[in-house]
Image: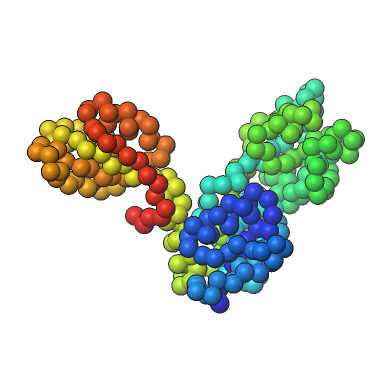
Amino acid sequence: MLKMALPSKGALSEEAIRLIKEAGYQCSPRGREQFVIDADNEIEFCFIRPRDIAVYVNSGIFSAGITGRDLALDSKCSYNELLPLGFGKSSFCYAVPRDSGVTNSGELEGSRIATSYVSLVEQDLTERGVQADVVRLDGAVEIAVRLGVADAVADVVQSGRTLEEAGLRILEEPVLESEGIFIVPEQKEELPEGVQKLANRIEGVLLARRYMIVEYDIARTRLNEACAVTPGIESPTVSPLNEEGWVAVKSMIKRSEVNTVMDELSRIGAKGILVSDVKACRL
């Protein structure tokens, strides 16, 4: 039976469960349940700390897992990042007191840097040729400077509001852009059938989230204009209507372009414009 690791808590956990369920698997834990078996798909899901998932996948205990890119890199384990998942997005940055004269990470030489990502920070500092004292903290890194434990911090940032409220400002460009990722053990051979099936389903869900289906009626004389607005993946589906000179069109469009497409279709005389979600797809 295939074994897969999922995050046990936080935003990563919620989004991972949603994704796996949309891919057609049963993986909802009850209460504090750590193991969920989907007998129909012959897969067992285990809910563990996101920080530990890359370690277990690397050891071969799990055939696949979902974790954050920042956590996986900090683990210093070997793995293959099969798919970026588009949720849990954040940036890993250095930050210093708002009134500090430090303008870039190269000026952190000799500083005390507080972080929960020791391996990630040590590797980055080595690559930059900066020697600093890395202070390991398990949480609430942003208050380390105020408490006198550190001169700067290195942490994941989403909006940056938490750092600002702590009187800190972000230095230069992020060290790393992170998000949820689907990982498998590092290997050169083909993926096991069950893992490949899981990856294909997840990819189908992610792809579907980028698209929607648009349907509308249009005068045949304006069909070429309409098809230029909604070309679809290969071409739109066109069906004749009972009303002479009119056709029904069905096509896939990018979710980010829905309103622009509807505006343009209305401009050229399309009627009965309907837009609906795509649950899953394979292209």
In this rendering, would 204 be left or right of 222?
right
Name which residue lies at 22% across and 35% down. 226
251 versus 27 height, above or below:
above
211 versus 225 height, above or below:
below
35 versus 157 height, above or below:
below
In this rendering, would 210 be left or right of 152?
left
In front: 74, or 279?
279
Q: Report if residue 160 is visible in the image.
A: yes
Q: Report if residue 126 is visible in the image.
A: no
- Residue 130 in the image: state x and y as whole percent: 75, 40
For residue 223, which quarter of the picture? top left
- Residue 120 in the image: state x and y as whole percent: 70, 49
Name which residue lies at 20% across and 42% down. 248
- Residue 70 in the image: state x and y as whole percent: 65, 49
Name which residue lies at 70% across and 31% down. 161
- Residue 280 in the image: state x and y as whole percent: 41, 55
User: Furthest-right residue in view?
Assistant: 148
